[in-house]
Amino acid sequence: MAMGIVSDTEFDKELTKVNPDKPREVSNSVPVTGEVVDMPAKGRGVGNVNVPDSLRKVIGETAVTEGRDQAVELARQFGISPSSASAYNVGATSTASYDERPNASNINKAKEKIGKRARMKLMRALHHITDEKLGEAKVRDLASIAKDMSVVFKHMEPEGPKTPANTGPTFVFYSPQFRKEEHYDVVTAKE
């Protein structure tokens, strides 16, 4: 029998085929009617397209710790555009509010964590560069590791508050160019 809505008699007939030892009790009461009721939506709600702040933070941290490609892939799984993932990478909540960064502290914490690990690796690499090893060829490898860790450390420094370069008044002085006497025409005056 195909699946679908059937009458009680058809249902009883099929039920006895499957389970012949146990007959079903049939009641002659009033049939029960059901009603489908929409439950209030949990989460964002109907029509709300805002990304939850916790998801923004996770995508931003993923961009810092695992790279932009992983963050874009994570955002894609939730139906979020790559441009929004880039905005979350700097702590912004959207591409329209790129200059406002309420989640920047969360991104800075992730950068500090990576920076701390890079500093430890840098110090270990520098520790292994000894006077004895300076004569060997492997120093280049250790120096390369130290250089790479310093670059990672520099890039993982948290962003500080941005201040303009010149905060005070600006004065511009113009000075005339010095010209020699030979550059001027000579006019002889008769008295």
Image (cartoon, rainbow, N blue to C red):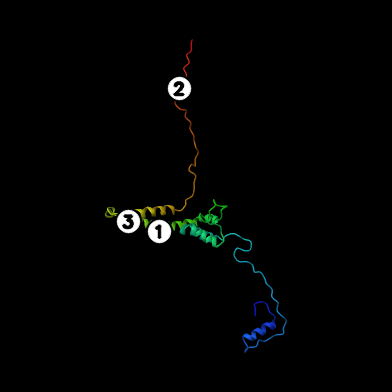
Q: Which residue is mark 1?
A: 117
Q: Hey, which residue is sitting farthest front in the picture?
A: 1
Between residue 188 and residue 176, name the one nearer to us: 188
Q: CA distance from mark 2 to mark 1?
A: 68 Å
Q: Does residue 13 appear anywhere in the picture?
A: yes
User: Disc 3 marks which amino acid?
Assistant: His
Judged from the image, the secondary structure of the residue bearing numbered disc 3 is helix
The residue under the point 52% across, 58% down is: 72
Earlier in the chain: of badge 3 and badge 1, it is: 1
User: Disc 2 marks which amino acid?
Assistant: His
Q: Is residue 49 left or right of residue 32?
A: left
Residue 27 horizontal/vertical position (percent):
70, 85
Please rate how many residues cluster around mark 2, counting C-alpha atoms within 10 Å: few if below 14, some from 14 to 19, many from 20. Answer: few
Residue 33 horizontal/vertical position (percent):
70, 77
Please rate how many residues cluster around mark 3, counting C-alpha atoms within 10 Å: few if below 14, some from 14 to 19, many from 20. Answer: few
Between residue 5 and residue 32, name the one nearer to us: 5
